[in-house]
Image (tube, rainbow, N blue to C red):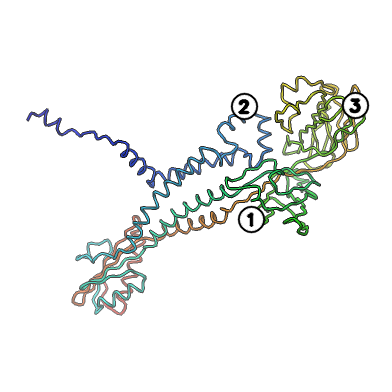
Amino acid sequence: MTVQELATEQEPKHVKLGLVGWLRWGWRTLTSMKTALILLFLLALASVPGSLVPQRGVDPDKVARLYEQSPTLAEWYDRFQLFEVFTSVWFAAIYLLLFTSLVGCIIPRVTTYARELRRKPPDAPKRLTRLPQSASFEGDLDVGEAARRLRKLRFRVVTGDGWVSAEKGYLRETGNLLFHVALLGILLAVGFGSLFGYRGNVLVVEGDGFANTVAAYDRFIPGSQVSAESLEPFSFQLADFKVAYQVTGDKKGQALDYTAHLKVNDSPGSPTRDYDLKVNDPLEIDGTQTYLIGNGYAPVFKVTDGKGQVAFEGPVPCLIESKATMASGCVVKVPDAQPAQLGFLLQFLPTSVPLTDGTYASAFPGELNPEVQLIGAFTGDLGLRSGQPQSVYELAPPEVLKKLTPLVMGTNVPKPLAVGQSIELPKGAGKLEFTGVKEWITLQTAYDPGRVPALIAAAAAVVGIALSLQIRRRRVFVRVDKGVVEVGGLTRTEGSAAGFAEEFADIVKVLSAGEKDVR
């Protein structure tokens, strides 16, 4: 055989895995601890946009404001489902992969753990002096007494002819397994909450009520197993809403406290009770929690059309334009006005002050000098009967807005209206009157049956990781021969030899108690 033939024969042959081989490789890769840690990190990383980008299910007002201020950016956010991070396809994919990976990690660990629990400590080595820790002393300690003393120190003990083998620290594996099972429990609890829970958002104006029904929500996100009958039948009325502001100092205008005074009925026919709803202090009724998440102003308007009929009267929730001063943009649509529909663009100023250039602005978020600035008034078909959905914070789509006839706009804008004042529209189109101010709040109602199980699982995970980090596996061996007692020990946990040295010295003291000549 030539050298070339020999070299060819020794070259490694490339083995084709085939479909089964690739599936086995994929499963082993997915269920490895390294992959589970990477997926856990990705899940935490994927949650970051949910905190930085406003979520439709939590703060729809901020989402609407972002569409007004940066429509292009908002479209890109929506394209990547960043307004609904925790229900997005990519977040669900990471969640399911992590769930599968943890299941694949836990199953073999349970088998290994069960085998470890049944395993007895190994026989004592013949030469204990070769172990990392060793000592000897003279005395009449026998194997039975040594075993008894080690059992008292909570060691698992086996004995043989002239030797004792002891081991402890099995709770380390228990903690490790508990941590992984708890992580799986958290994922199961989240999944259970997503199936059988729901959340919804609603805007309520002072004086109005709310009943916990699907139709009452502005936005309702149910789990796949939730029906209309699943909702707890409670109701309440918003009697009053108060905000306390800092009135002096560098932080003037900063909100100090929010309080919504509710009249609550826990069920149909139940007596009414008072409840003060505050931020992070939700109203809870049989597991359903209602949170206060936002507030704003709803000035009250009365619109009389060209025929002298009252075509509109009531509060109009305004979209906050400046959080510092609560200056807000308002849209009033009057589809029933005659002879033509009317639309108004307004700005509400809680504490109106004149500026040097002749314009007006709000100087304080509290309602000290409320005025309404008319930005524009239009007449024509607002497109409300076209069947196309419209935002309540938008007068009309751009293509419809172009066809409207402006009545008040640009240089002929009047001074702001105080409460009780009105403005006559040109061409006998009607009259707009500012009659009062109310406030609105946005609420999120959530029912999550997986909340308590997730909390329990999280606590179990903390206990498990603490056991895994604090406890170390260690072994102690004792040999008794002709009045000489040899003791040896080692730790099975990497990096804990220094701590074990002190414990080993204490074990030797216990074993040599009443003996002499410890070396």
Residue annotated with mark 3: 306
Q: Position of residue 42 (x, y in %)?
A: 47, 41
Mark 1, residue position: 287
Measure the alpha-carbon separation of dots 1 and 2: 40 Å
Within 10 Å of disc 3 (Cα), the crowding (few <14, some 14-19, many 20+) is: some
Q: Position of residue 60 (x, y in %)?
A: 67, 39
Question: For numbered disc 3, what is the local secondary structure?
Answer: loop
Q: How crowded is mark 1: few (under 14 residues within 10 Å), some or many (20 or more)?
A: few
Q: Quadrant of the C terminus?
A: bottom left
Residue 187 lies, in percent from the top left, at 50, 49
Q: In this view, does 92 lie to the left or right of 414?
A: left
The image quadrant that residue 268 belongs to is bottom right
Q: What element carries label 2?
A: helix
Distance CA(mark 2)–CA(mark 3): 40 Å
Q: Is residue 100 above or below residue 150?
A: above
Residue 289 shown left or right of residue 121 in the figure? right
Label 1 sits on a secondary structure element that is loop
Check the image and report above or below for 68 versus 122. Answer: above
**Residue type at numbered disc 3:** Gly
Label 3 vs 1, first from the N-terminus = 1
Residue 141 visible in this rendered orientation of the protein:
yes
Q: Which residue lies furthest to the right in this view?
A: 308
**Closer to the camera, 179 or 202?**
202
Q: In the picture, which quadrant includes the N terminus?
A: top left
CB atoms at circles 3 and 1 under 8 Å apart?
no
270 to 6, vertically: above or below: below
What is the quadrant of residue 372 in the picture? top right
Instruction: Look at discs 2 and 3 and give the one toward the viewer.
Output: 3
For the residue marked with disc 1, what is the amino acid?
Answer: Gly
- Indicate which disc, 1 or 2, sits on the residue closer to the N terminus: 2
Would you name the residue on which mark 2 appears? 72
